[in-house]
């Protein structure tokens, strides 16, 4: 059993990542969700986190509210992909019953990681503001985290500028602090790898037909996400970026990684870009992480559906093998 804390800005793909982690109850113990400003503002992402837990029937898991803005900048959000409320504009965030904890997310992170040194894997799927503040607050924090898995960055092409990916672009100073903090094991799951985590219209339709509260929730919230993708790129479907971090935790073989030294640009034309030196190519650079370079798309969806809707796994396999008629 791996103990994890998910630092998140839900966010449509965040919601799916959280639901998958909760479904993998024999492998992952989700200790808490900590929220951070990102896709939408802090109050909305915190409500959304509570709502996702409610939909999964897991209200007992605590939610801690974190930073309302990046370390040094104004916040920029991503409503055009996630909707004004962060969950596809369906009113989900408005009607949750639970409440978040009183303790500030960074205080919680520092306290919990210290209390369980070497035990907790941190999965960061929003801007890295909370993680960077924890590093600044406690000089032993980075060394005390068992493993840090980040969705963010890109080796070649960003989604907010030609080089910068949204999570790092939102708070580049935070990302820079995190990559130089000396975490024992870091994996950067960036845009090159998440391009393989692509929900096709056929798989999305299957979610509708599965017809459970969770499958219909996923089907509905991914509507705005797929629309955003169509409007920006004329692509049918949507990319489930954050979900790949959880799939990686569940099966390391689905993601191919290479050793790298990563630094973050914090100004100029490439502001927010992750600068990736593969250490095989640049042996003078000291490795500070592994970067995900590609993923097995079939393996990804077999895990996603296999944990969330196991009785449909055979249909998913047929769809993935190109048999559209089932
Ligand atoms: C990342 O940005 C956000 O919009 C998503 O939730 C994901 O964490 C992808 O660039
Ligand atoms: Ca996210």
Image (cartoon, rainbow, N blue to C red):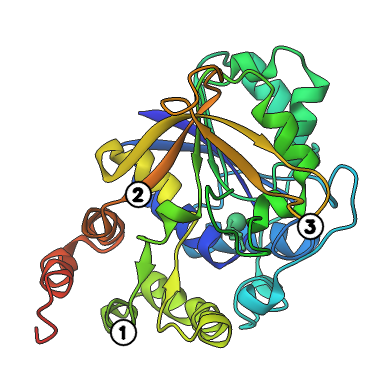
Q: Nearer the viewer, mark 2 or mark 3?
A: 2
Q: Regarding ligand 1, which quadrant of the image does it lie in? A: bottom right
- Residue 205 shows which numbered tag? 1
- Residue 42 shows which numbered tag? 3
In whole angstroms, how far apart are the C-alphas of marks 3 and 1? 31 Å
Q: Which residue is mark 2?
A: 294
Residue 9 in sight in this render: no
Q: Residue at x 83, y 47 (%)?
A: 267
Q: Residue at x 37, y 68 (%)?
A: 198
Viewport quadrant of the C terminus:
bottom left
Q: Residues within 10 Å of mark 3 (few under 14, many from 20)?
A: many
Q: Nearer the viewer, mark 1 or mark 2?
A: 2
In whole angstroms, how far apart are the C-alphas of marks 2 and 3? 31 Å
Disc 2 element: strand
Q: Are marks 2 and 3 in contact (CB under 8 Å)?
A: no
Q: Locate residue 181: give its quadrant.
A: top right
Q: Are marks 1 and 2 in contact (CB under 8 Å)?
A: no
Q: Locate residue 252: give its quadrant.
A: top left
- The one of 187 and 233 positioned closer to us in this rendering: 233
């Amino acid at each position: 059993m791996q103990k994890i804390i998910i630092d998140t800005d839900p966010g449509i793909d965040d919601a799916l990542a959280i639901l998958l982690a909760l479904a993998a109850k024999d492998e992952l113990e989700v200790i808490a969700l900590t929220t951070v400003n990102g896709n939408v503002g802090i109050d909305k992402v915190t409500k959304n986190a509570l709502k996702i837990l409610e939909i999964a029937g897991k209200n007992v898991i605590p939610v801690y509210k974190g930073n309302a803005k990046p370390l040094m900048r104004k916040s920029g959000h991503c409503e055009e992909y996630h909707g004004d409320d962060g969950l596809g504009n369906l009113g989900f965030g408005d009607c949750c019953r639970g409440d978040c904890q009183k303790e500030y997310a960074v205080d919680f992170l520092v306290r919990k990681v210290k209390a369980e040194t070497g035990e907790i894997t941190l999965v960061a799927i929003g801007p890295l503001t909370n993680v960077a503040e924890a590093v600044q607050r406690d000089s032993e924090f980075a060394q005390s985290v068992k493993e840090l898995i980040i969705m963010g960055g890109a080796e070649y092409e960003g989604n907010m500028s030609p080089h910068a990916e949204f999570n790092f672009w939102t708070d580049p100073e935070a990302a820079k602090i995190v990559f130089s903090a000396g975490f024992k094991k870091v994996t950067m799951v960036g845009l090159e790898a998440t391009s393989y985590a692509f929900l096709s219209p056929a798989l999305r339709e299957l979610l509708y037909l599965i017809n459970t509260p969770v499958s219909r929730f996923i089907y509905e919230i991914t509507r705005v996400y797929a629309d955003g993708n169509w409007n920006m790129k004329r692509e049918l479907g949507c990319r489930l970026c954050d979900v790949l971090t959880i799939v990686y935790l569940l099966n390391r073989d689905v993601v191919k990684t290479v050793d790298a030294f990563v630094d973050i640009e914090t100004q100029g034309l490439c502001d927010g870009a992750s600068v990736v030196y593969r250490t095989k190519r640049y042996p003078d650079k000291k490795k500070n992480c592994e970067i995900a370079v590609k993923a097995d798309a079939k393996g990804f969806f077999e895990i996603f559906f296999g944990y969330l809707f196991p009785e449909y796994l055979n249909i998913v396999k047929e769809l993935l093998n190109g048999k559209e008629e089932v």
